[in-house]
C-alpha cells in the first residue's frame, strides 16, 4: 500500500522520481524501491514523506483512507469556499 500511495501522490504533484528524491535528499533508486515495495523508508524518512505530501503517516501506510487539507492561514470565508467546492465535486461524482 505504501508504494502505491507515494507513487499516486508523486504523480498527482507532477514530479518524477528524480525530483522527488532530490526534495528528500535521496536517490531515484530509493524512491523506485519504495514505490515497488522492495524496501520501506526509515521512520524519519516516512515522516518527511508524509510532511512533503501533507498527509498522515497512517494514510501512507494504508492504515487510514482519510486525507486532510491544511487550511491554516486562510480566512473562514476562504475555508468555506473550499468546503463548498469539495461538496460540489463530491455531488458531481456521486451523480455519475
Image: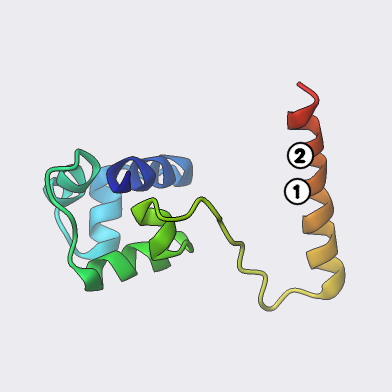
Q: Position of residue 60 (x, y in %)?
A: 38, 55
The residue that appears at 79% across and 56% down in the rendered structure is 83
Q: Quadrant of the C terminus?
A: top right
Direction top: furthest residue: 96
Q: Nearer the viewer, residue 1 or 45?
A: 1
Q: Position of residue 57 (x, y in %)?
A: 38, 64
The residue that appears at 75% across and 39% down in the rendered structure is 90
Colour setting: rainbow
User: Is 39 situated left or right of 59 in this image?
Assistant: left
Q: Quadrant of the N terminus?
A: top left
| Disc 1 crowd, CA 10 A, few/some/many (<14, 14-19, 20+) | few
Q: Is disc 2 placed on a helix, strand or loop?
A: helix
Q: Position of residue 54 (x, y in %)?
A: 48, 63
Contact check, label 1 and label 2, Cβ < 8 Å? yes
Direction bottom: furthest residue: 73
Label placed on residue 89: 2
User: Is 37 situated left or right of 70 in this image?
Assistant: left
Q: Quadrant of residue 53?
A: bottom left
Q: Position of residue 89 (x, y in %)?
A: 76, 39
Q: Could you tell me how many numbered marks the image carries?
A: 2
Label placed on residue 67: none
The residue where tag 1 is placed is 86
Q: Quadrant of residue 69?
A: bottom right
Vertical position of residue 24 compared to residue 90: above or below: below
Q: CA distance from mark 1 to mark 2?
A: 5 Å
Amino acid at each position: 500500500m505504501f508504494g502505491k500511495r507515494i507513487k499516486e501522490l508523486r504523480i498527482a504533484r507532477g514530479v518524477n522520481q528524480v525530483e522527488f528524491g532530490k526534495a528528500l535528499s535521496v536517490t531515484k533508486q530509493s524512491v523506485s524501491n519504495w514505490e515497488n515495495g522492495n524496501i520501506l523508508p526509515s521512520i524519519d524518512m516516512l515522516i518527511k514523506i508524509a510532511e512533503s505530501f501533507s498527509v498522515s503517516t497512517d494514510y501512507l501506510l494504508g492504515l487510514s483512507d482519510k486525507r486532510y487539507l491544511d487550511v491554516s492561514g486562510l480566512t473562514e470565508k476562504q475555508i468555506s469556499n473550499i468546503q463548498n467546492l469539495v461538496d460540489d465535486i463530491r455531488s458531481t461524482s456521486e451523480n455519475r
